[in-house]
Image (cartoon, grey):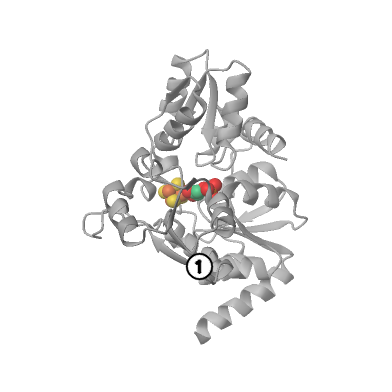
Amino acid sequence: PTERAALKDRIRRLLKEKNAVMVSHYYVHPDLQDLAEETGGIVSDSLEMARFGRDHAAQTLVVSGVRFMGETAKILSPEKTVLMPDLDATCSLDLGCPIDQFSAFCDQHPDRTVVVYANTSAAVKARADWLVTSSCALDIVRALKDAGHKILWAPDRHLGAYIERETGADMVFWNGACIVHDEFKALELELLKKEHPEAKILVHPESPAEVVALADAVGSTSAILKAAREMDAREFIVATDNGMMHKLRTLNPGKTFYEAPTAGNSATCKSCAHCPWMAMNGLADVARVLETGANAIHVEPVLIPRARQPIDRMLAFTA
Ligand code: 13P
Ligand code: SF4
């Protein structure tokens, strides 16, 4: 505890010295969430992380999350320094959607509007017409459908299928998944619900369709937080990365939160409700990168203007 406290003090001091601000995702360690908020930064979903990073005056951003979040911040503010605790913190969706194959897929469907999830590389974004996160995907695809567009969707097949069911849009899909949400199990979830019949079920739409079908509320991390605060219930079962529990519990002290079941056994499950890449973010690395300037995000300058277009569209749509 004393070492943690000393690291936090060092980070607070360094943030001031370097005119830097911290932006953390809800899935990173509670220390990094609390420190971001306490020092004038933000803990939020991926959409608000992007907006906050763009709008904040600080010239250095420390992004605690995964690589696509740092890259999005850099694309929106190429003049800023964007530091990340660990540059190897990636995402199964990003890894599963390499630009060459994705580009060939787009070429096969020239009549479709290309909508990609934020969890992608800068090169994939540069091939897209629209960027979306889970908090705005439904509204954006609905608006595109109403305007007569057919959609090419990548990379998360569960989120894509959810949006197709909700909007009735004409969509073709890339076959990607989040290794965390893909593990939630409907049968086990029903059993847990039987143990807690009053509990409301909150589900992130990166989860499989059978899990989404059991939900009382479906949405992004910020939508899950909102539902937990606003729903008239004392108990909740939550199907998303368990990093989310920190904010859910601190903001709702009178309510009880249970983790939705995964495969249930760490020997068989690739990632039991906690993202291994989000878990790579730590206090010592935040202090180190602030001190040394190491781990600055670099995005190929030639990609930036093109990758920025779909992000700007999303931010304008949701403003
Ligand atoms: P949101 O915070 O946008 O819901 O994204 C979830 C996620 O998996 C980020 O890695
Ligand atoms: Fe990617 Fe899933 Fe990890 Fe989010 S939780 S960064 S979607 S692997």
Residue drawn where x is 40% and y is 34% of the image: 157
Above or below for 123 versus 287: above
Closest to the observer, 74 or 293:
74
In this orientation, does residue 288 appear? no
- Residue at 23 percent across and 60 percent down: it is 265
Q: Position of residue 122 (x, y in %)?
A: 55, 37
Quarter of the picture containing the C terminus is top right
Q: Position of residue 193 (x, y in %)?
A: 34, 56
Between 114 and 182, the one nearer to me in the picture: 182
Residue hosting label 1: 255
**What is the residue that sits farthest to the top in this orientation?**
111
Query: Left or right of 149: which side holds 104?
Result: left
Residue 285: give x, y in percent of width and height: 52, 67
Residue 14 % position (x, y): 67, 72
Residue at the far bottom: name it: 2
Residue 68 as seen in the image, left or right of residue 35:
left
In the rendered image, the vertical position of residue 290 relative to residue 209, given as above or below:
below
Q: Residues within 10 Å of mark 1 (few under 14, many from 20)?
A: some
Which amino acid type corresponds to the residue marked 1 in the rendered image? Answer: Lys
Taking depth in this image into account, of 239 and 266 the one nearest to the observer is: 239
Give the residue at the far right of this rendering.
Answer: 57
